[in-house]
Image: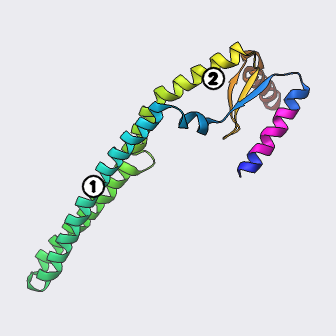
Amino acid sequence: MKIIKLLILSSILFSFAISNYKIGYVDSNEIMKNVEEVRQAEIDLEKEGRRLEAEGIKLVNRLDSLKQEFERQRLLMSDTRKTEKENELKQMELSIQKFQMEKFGPEGEIYKLQAQMMKPISDKIQVAIDIVGKEQGYDIILDALSGAIVYALPQHNLTEAVIEELNKVSGSITE
């Protein structure tokens, strides 16, 4: 996959080079490896992840204990009591699933914390890229890892022109 990205990046760089644009690229992985704040954020995230994982393990262990206790006493329980205990166990299973989603799911606490910790670092990196781009006269700077544009002169932004053209096309279609 990385080879494909590099080939695409190379073809983009070649086509821009023909157009007399000054193009550069950065390797965001390499930048991240060399920023001490990133390492500290990773350590802090790892600690928080382990703390949350330990909390989850405690919940699972508690559930397992309750299940074992239920199985030992099941024969001695009335049907009503069995149903109550089974419902209690199901509720606890649901609360564990909820805990895992709230802490580790795609919108979970650990991902929000990561985004919160990385935002100021990413902002600093972007400022550095902007300064290098302006001082060294680059028109566009790409990220070798993702192929995304991380810096471009505003005059190369075609967003407004595309929106205007879409409005023209949309207007002619509806007329």
The residue under the point 71% across, 52% down is 1
Tell me the SS state at disc 2: helix
- Counting from the top left corner in percent of width and height, residue 119 is at 48, 29
Q: Residues within 10 Å of mark 2 (few under 14, many from 20)?
A: some
> Toward the viewer: 171 or 123?
123
> Toward the viewer: 50 or 80?
50
83 relative position to 97: left or right:
left
**Height in image: 45 above or below 142?**
below
Q: Is residue 12 magenta?
A: yes
- Counting from the top left corner in percent of width and height, residue 152 is at 71, 22
Instruction: Identify the mark at residue 129; answer none if there is no mark.
Output: 2
Q: Is residue 77 magenta?
A: no
Hey, which residue is sitting farthest right in the picture? 18
**Height in image: 169 above or below 73?**
above
Q: Quadrant of residue 21?
A: top right
Q: Quadrant of the C terminus?
A: top right
- Counting from the top left corner in percent of width and height, residue 169 is at 81, 28
24 relative position to 44: left or right:
right
The residue under the point 59% across, 39% down is 29
**Height in image: 135 above or below 91?**
above
Residue type at mark 1 is Ala
- What residue is pinned by disc 1? 54
Tell me the SS state at disc 1: helix
Magenta-tinted stretch: 6-14
